[in-house]
Amino acid sequence: MALARLGARGLVGYDLSEGAFFQRVLPFDLDGVEELQPRLKDARKLVADGGVQIAKSGKEEAEAWVRGTDCEHRVVVASDGTTCTCPWFAKHPGDRGPCKHILAVQIFTGDADDA
Amino acid sequence: MTPEELERAVHSGNKEHCLRLILTASEDQRRRAAKCAVKLLRDLNGASFEEVSRPNLLGLRPAWIDRYNSAEIAVLGTATLSQLKKITRGAHLGIPWAFEILTVRQPDWVAEWAEWTLSNGIWPGIGSDYNNWNAVRKLIKTGRIQTPINDAYITCMIAAPPWRESVKKWLLADPNLLQYEVWRLFEVEGSRDSSLAGRDKYSNPKQTWSAALQEFSAEGHIDRGRLVTASLDALCRDFSAFHAGWHSKFHEDLKPTLDERAENVSKYLGLVNSRIPATVSFALKALTVLEKAALLAPETIVNAVSPAITAREKGKASLALRLLIRAAGQHPELRHRAALTAADGLLHNSPDVQKLALDIIEKFGDTGSPELADKLRLNVDGVAPSLRARLAALVEPAASALRPNIPTVEPAVDTLEERAAGLVSRWGMLAGVRTALDSLKEGRSPRNGLRLDPLSIPRLDPEERVHPIRDLDELVAVFASVIENYGPPDEIERVLDGVSRLCADRPPDFDRRTSALRKRARQLLGIDKRDLPQVGGAVYSLCQLALAWIDREPIQPWMHQPSLFSFFHQRVVEIGRRARLERAAQLLAAPTHSGGWIDPRIAVARFQAHRETNLPPLDLEERSESSPSLWARLIGKPREVADSVRALAAGGTGDRFDMIQALLRLAPDGRVESLTGAGTVKGEIGAALVYALGGDKPVTGNDAALWIAAARSRNPHGDDRAIESRFSNMGPDAGIAARVTLKWVPRKDSDYDEQILICAPPVPPRPRVDVPTVLHHAQTKEHFHAEFVVGPLLALLAQVWPLGRSAWFGAGAYSIGWNMDWVEARWGDVEYLRLLLDPDTDLDDLALDMLAFGLAAREAGESASATDGLITAIGDGRVTARELRQALCHALRVKDLVLARWSKTLGDAARISPLHAVTVRDALEEVIAATGSRKTSEIVALLELLHELCVETGTAISSRDTRARLATITGTSKSAKLAKALLALKPDGSISYTRQAAKIAAEARIERAERWQRITAPE
């Protein structure tokens, strides 16, 4: 079980010819990690370019508009989850992590873990 | 060269002139013309199908393809790399002229272009050039760029030799490729479009890559030893099964000598762990060769074969176990370890593998060893029933006389009687509870499966309510979701209803709130790029609806033969027309409950509140940004299509399709109570509504489509003489209920039979788009097939007439039946099988046919869905041994049905519970009697399953016909041994297994009645 978990995280690999597990030393250079996270990169760019506008900020619910190409995306942060009107969120509602617009709002409001 | 000159050259379609202009211009002139060239290409990309296919008649207008090629030359000859990257298919522009143009232009981005164009893969363009590999290769050879190091260079090279030409001859024309590129073939997997496996599969065997490399090796042009090793290295690289197959075959085609194999023994051993079954078999065979030649240390075998023993494939596991037998037989010191390793084989699905493993354990194992005893004890319940006694004897000699897995607890009949007594008699009777309890007293399951009258079954489960969309923001969110995910159907219906009700709700920031949806709809329809739509089916209609609502763009009727999809599309057109005019209204046909059902009481309230929308007729001249006018699109269409569209454009109140759809969705619940209210609805629609609900109103009025919908809702599977006499000869499931039969007729060109679906009365040559019940049967006509390939669309259209499942089962049986061997990738067909999962859907003969074909389907998704369907239907009482036997025996007529696949799916179903095991066993016993026309080798897997199930249930073969059939199977084959074993079986005298099955059957029927009682209880 432990090996399966570590394998899923990419920390352990399996050598076919040796028939054994081995440790995968991952690049822990944070700059390198961000390169592999295009959504995070795009989110930072959106914030830097002034693409986030907070429309409503209440205790129960907050609403923000995030600039897209030829459109604007509405991000709603509510107690039962955060939503966005972009196609990526419509396709993978939360099952692959937040979209770049939600990340941008989180970074903007200081809610992101790594902001 | 001026931009105007280039434009004229493109319009003339004269490629040579265009190329001459590019080659003789200065780079400054070229750059100035780039914008114009890109626009010309985009315009040509956005041409309609009619424009693209129009020939160059009398030289009046050059053919589109000549103008398009000229535009490709113009763009490649003027644009920068960043401009090229923004153009659709920009990486494949002007392939035949690329080298010449880029050599003259000498841009500093040529090396980057080379990597980029190759990484875009191959494009099936016109002529023989599929990618720019030849141009890139010429640039390398002329020293303009370095050899690209990316994999795409090699992938594209595989596709570069012209078809019908020998690869060897092609390589000889550029022998430097043998130094580097050829060896990279073993390091690069290839792509879906270009790979060694794909290329060689469709080439003349003498002209393949494999043949070329073998010949070069034989002639000494390339190192044979390196080829042997490289092909094994390729197999270690985790390529897909299809791609890896080329390398294993190539390796064996090289006919490695024993010395060559011995040198690579570590690689073979490593490949035993491969995730690809064929590679494992390949490695095991190579190891067997080495072992026979005494070139492999026996302890190495024992260590290496363990993963193969637990592999899913029977052949692979058997091969590994046989290697173990040989090793242990020759080296006594390895026996205990061999037995321990073999014990893993007891977990295998195949009884043959389990038997082989048990043979090894019995022969070589030391059962006194605690390690081995523990392993064996764990597996006693998991092995095939026929082996349990043997294994139990090893683990616990005293227990060998017992038959494990017999349920020892007697079912508590009294408790079931108590539950049955608490049922409302109507539900208990419809669920067949009394029959099941009486059968239980006799110690058996019910003999007949439940038949369900669709008008008697309650459908309005409060937990399955569909909640209408509340506001604009929810509508935008759900709309965005359904166009990305193609459904689910309930959500699509919520969107249609939401647009219909909320279309007049346009707050000041409406544009801002809908901008993302608007952009996505335009993108999917290909409007912004002047390209073809990226989506089809319901999403195509929904994207147009989004633009009709947001931008007030017109939606045009479906311009093809009338089909069930065109009925859906026409509903969307109606809603779109109202949305454009902001005439908000409750949708009559919006389902109130999942599955497309409408509560009749709510339907009556909607009809009472309904006001005719009275929209003006469609404007045939109106055009939108995305398409030309309706008149223009009608040119060249078949007459029936044009007639249908004109009729739709001319008439209607704007919500006629909505009314028809609403009538077809009326649930069976609460119809009688709704009649009084329905009587107050005025006009022809009111009369039709009363008729649909079962009232006595006479058939009046002239709207055939409306009355046919009412009749099919009133009595889905019966003839309606009143309707037929008033609106005659409209097709199947109009006035006369459809009689659909599946038949097999001998093919002229082969030994096999052809399946045909016969519908009576037949589908008329021009079925009406507003009569969807008839269109359900249009699938029997060739040209209607395409739309049913798409699964999500099929699931959506199955909600048009939820009471009418017979047509779907007929279409499903036909579609899955002729494609059991997966000769065509029809991924959507699995949706037909999913209809079986609804426990309240009646299974008629066609459903049973479909089930039998699905159980024999080659495609894993189909066979798994059919297995799930069977498990559900046995569990809920719709299928007993009688129905299963009928289905299987009927399907046996299809000569190309592979019986071995049934053994897998039926075996999976039989494992679920004693009821499933008994049902499958009893059906199979009868089926074996009907296999007289089959070779015995075809039924061996079924015999094996029957034998296991007989042992499991403690029963013998009692059918005279089956015993007679088994007696005909003689000789020493496996089937003969199984037949003999089956004939020798004696009932074990215990009835607890069948009683347990009977109890499960009775419990399921009580649960069904209790469920119906719960959902019909007043809230």
Image (cartoon, helix red, strand yellow):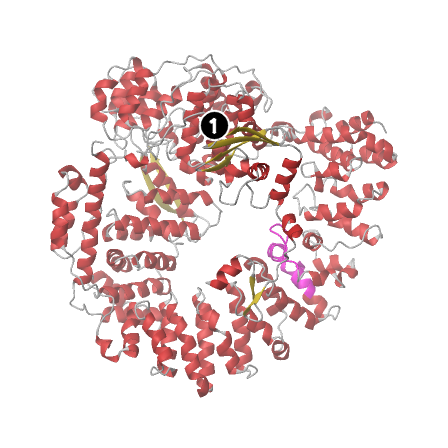
Which residue type carries mark 1? Asp
Residue at 54%, 77% in the rendered image: B289
Foreground pick, B406 / B812? B406
Foreground pick, B961 / B483? B483
Tell me if residue B948 can be seen. Answer: yes
Residue B421 placed where, x, y %? 11, 44
Q: Based on the picture, tell me whether residue B881 belongs to the magenta stretch.
A: no
Residue B606 placed where, x, y %? 32, 20
Q: In which quarter of the image is residue B980?
A: bottom left
Residue B290 position (above or below residue B949): below
How many numbered marks have been drawn onto this rendered protein structure? 1
Which residue has dot 1 on it? B473
Considering the numbered disc 1 on the image, is that residue within a helix, a strand or a loop?
helix
Q: Based on the picture, tell me whether residue B211 belongs to the magenta stretch.
A: yes
Q: Which span is picked out in magenta?
A: B188-213
Residue B77 placed where, x, y %? 80, 37
